[in-house]
Every structure is written in C-alpha cells, then in structure tokens.
Image: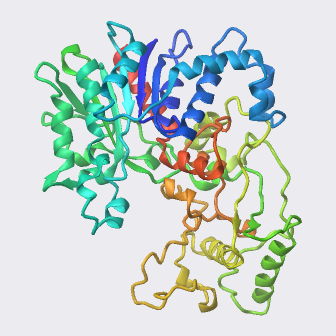
Amino acid sequence: MIPVVDIFAGPGGLNEGFSNVLDAITNKPVFKTAVSIEMEESAVRTLTLRAAYRHLLHSDGGLPPVYKDFLDGKRSLAELHDDARFASAYQAAQKEVRQFELSEKSRAESDQIIQDALGENPSTWVLIGGPPCQAYSLAGRSRRTNDVEFENDHKHFLYREYLHIIKRFKPAVYVMENVKGLLSATNGGSKMFELIRKDLTSPAEDLHYTLHSMVVETGPDGPGPQDFIIRAEEFGIPQKRHRVIIVGIRTDLNLGAPAILEKSLPVTVAEAIGNLPRIRSSVSRTSDPGGQLWADVRRSIHERGKKGILQETLSFTPKSKLDTSSSSPAASLNDDIMSNISAKTYHEWISERAGRATLQHEARGHMIEDLQRYYLLSGLAHSLADSPKVRQLPRSYWPNHKNVEAASMPFEDRFRVQVWNKPSTTIVSHIAKDGHYYIHPDPTQMRSLTVREAARLQTFPDNYFFVGNRTQQYTQVGNAVPPLLAFKIGAAVADLLS
C-alpha cells in the first residue's frame, strides 16, 4: 500500500477519501495512512476513532459486534472502550494520529514523527493536507481590514511547514487544498499565490514538481491560477464549495499528469438530506420538553395565514403533524431522486456500512423570534425556489437591528434557507456559531441544520462519528474537505502511481 502523510488533517476529510480508494484487482485499499497530524483536540479524537474503525474494518474479524451496536445506537462511545478488540485497535490508532502543532520552532520534532512513520528510505508516498485558511479567506480578510497585525498572522505562512515537509521528505505526489481567496490574497504587497506556486514548483535546487489542476488539462504553460479552483457541485457534491486544489508531481519520476475529474449532474439538498428523520428544534433558554411552546409558535403564525395575512409567504401546504420518529439514514428514496445517477452514487457512498441509528441528528434550540422567521423564510423559499432576503418578510418579523431600515443593510441575507432543489451553500466552520445561514428548507421543522445534515452535505458517510461537544462537531464538519471529492482525487492519484 502507498503511505499517506496527512497534515493539518482536521477531522479527516481528505484522509477518508484516499483511504477508500480500492485496487481494482485485489479490492484492497491502495493507500495506508502513515500518520495524521492535527493540533485541535476534538478533531484528533475524531481522527483516532476513525482510524480505529479502519483498523477493525480491515482486520481478519472485520467490525466487531460492539462497533455495530454503536452504529445502531445501542452502545455509547464510552462503552466501545470496554471491548478488547476495539481497545486494541484504538491503541494502534493513537500511534497513527498525532496531536501536534506544526511550526518552524517544532520542525525537529515533527520531522522525527514523519520519519518514524515513513521509515528510513521512503520511496513512493503521498502528502495531503491544507494549511489553515483563515488568513486567506475573503471573510477573514474583510473582518480584519483595519487589523495592523493581520499581515503578520502566522497563518499566512503555515504553508511553509507544508513546503518544509516536501523539501525534507520528497513525496512523489502532494495534494494541497485551500480557499479560493488564496488567489487574491497579498502580503507585503506580494501575491501569496504566486509566492506559494513558485515555492511548490521548485522547493529545492535538486527537487522540482509540476503543478496540476484536477479540472483543466495541463497546457504547455501550465494551469492558470483560476484553473486550480474545483467547484464541488460540478462533481457530485451537494454543496457549492469552491476550493483551490493543487496536485504536485515530482518531475524526476516521469509519472505524467493525473486524469482530470469527470463532471456529473448536481446533487441537491433534497437528494442529500431529504430522507433523514424529520425533527423539531427546541426553544432556546426555555424548558419545553413536550414541544408545546414550539407548536404554539407554528400554530400562531399559520392562524395569521388563514386570516389572509402572510398569504404569499405561506403558499406551501404544511403537514398537520410533525413525525419525529427515527428511521435509518439508508431508508429508501423515491424513484425521482434515485434516477439521478449522481445522487445514486452519493447515497451508495454515504450509506455504506451505515447503522440503523441516525447519528448526531439533533436540532439545536432557537429563540422564538427566529423560529418564526425560519418558518416564514423557508415557506417563502418554497414559493421562490430560492432563498429570500429577510426584508421580504412583513416588517414585524424583521430582526431588531439598528440598521435594519438602511438602504444597504449589512448581512441582509444572513438568514439563508438551504433550497431543496439546489446544492447547498458552502458549509463552513461558522455554522458552529450561527445557524441563521443554514435554515432547513422544510418550514414545518423551523430549525437550522443538524450536525448530521451538515456532514451529509460535506459527504461524510453516515457512520462517521464526530467526537466532542456539538460546537466542536459543527466546526470539524465545516473545516473539512468533502470526502467524496477527496476520493475522486485519490482515485486519480492512485491511477497515476500504478
């Protein structure tokens, strides 16, 4: 198997994709994770659990009954550790996953970690990962416009740790992911992308790489900056996620160029999350165990609609009762959805080895005023087949912001409904702090997306468990590379190296 070193690993989106690439003849994994390096504690616990799962999956006995019980919702995470086989696999996983902060000062230690993982004379191996992108993101730059320390933010230069590993260990192939804001970011008057591109092409005098796009054939002059952008929704991912993906190939190996990704029909929000159990949110900072207050909110708004008020907004037909019963995430979808070959491929991916329980599918609480807005906005989105602006609601439902009447209201679309018949907007880590941008399209549920719904839009399999509290789980999901996209990139790299 081809060793993979995964740095800035997050919860393991890139690694999950590469780990699922199978040899066409042996049906065994092509890649084996030598080491995953991540600094955030909850993400490290998620990576370790997933690594233990893989150890068990590919062991002689396969997944033990206790792990299947965990996926079925019959065992807790704590109870897994009481099982001898799981405990042994988890111990092996702890050697594979390392909690460590990469920096210039810690290079001696990180070099030793990677050296121990690869062995003394590694031949063909692959480096994957994406340096933290806050310093390059358009949103991050706008928030720090007047921050005099912004240009000195160490995150601008974490790619140098990626570069150092390339120079020191000379991978056959590397895959680097980042936000598209990298293409326009500057530091000290210089364009960050051109600096990074030059460094990645010639990391050392005797070490050179050709840089490849995964979506545009490489011409004689190489890809242009925009050619490195992958628009995920064009490749079977139910999300409009646009990221820079650079594939570097060592020139002395004469491997050629990777095949570009094949475009496919879009997968919509309905096709991705439409078969998950319908649930209701709770009312924040209020005890409402039976959901009576929540139901009263919905009933009062709909009564206004019956009286001719909000008629345009309420042009959908609400269900008389919310069914909160549980069902398997692998429940059958209707024929219309499964006629989309992209959706069929997507569901085969997320449902493989899924348990009977729907893991991490609990709604968070919302203020009563926001429940009302969610109900009305998703109803209006149903009519428009698009996400409405908050000022399209009756004035009494506008948020009580001091600039709400301004001609140009900042963040007017901060209440955003994810529309059934389109891919979702980009799932980012900010979903952990604010659900307004991720309103569920079903008006009768009056809530933002759950961790599982966000994970599905990111194409994490339904048996992928995120460790930590709910805020940490959302953050991990938002920071990840979609595993199904990573799988397609990994398959192209595997073909190249074969």
- Residue 91 image position (x, y, % from top left): 62, 18
- Residue 479 image position (x, y, % from top left): 48, 46
The front one of 166 and 210 is: 166
- In this rendering, the answer to whether 335 lies above or below 379 is above
Q: Residue at x 24, y 63 (%)?
A: 148
The front one of 58 and 26 is: 58
Q: Residue at x 38, y 44 (%)?
A: 132
Residue lying at the far left of the rendered structure: 205
- Left or right of 167 in this view: 178: right
- Residue 165 image position (x, y, % from top left): 29, 26
- Residue 279 image position (x, y, % from top left): 77, 58
* Quadrant in which the C terminus is drawn: top left
Q: Is residue 54 visible?
A: yes
Q: Residue at x 29, y 52 (%)?
A: 153
Residue 159 falls in which quadrant of the image?
A: top left
Residue lying at the far front of the rendered structure: 105
- Left or right of 190 in this view: 473: right
- Left or right of 119 in this view: 363: right
- In this rendering, the answer to whether 4 lies above or below 348 is above
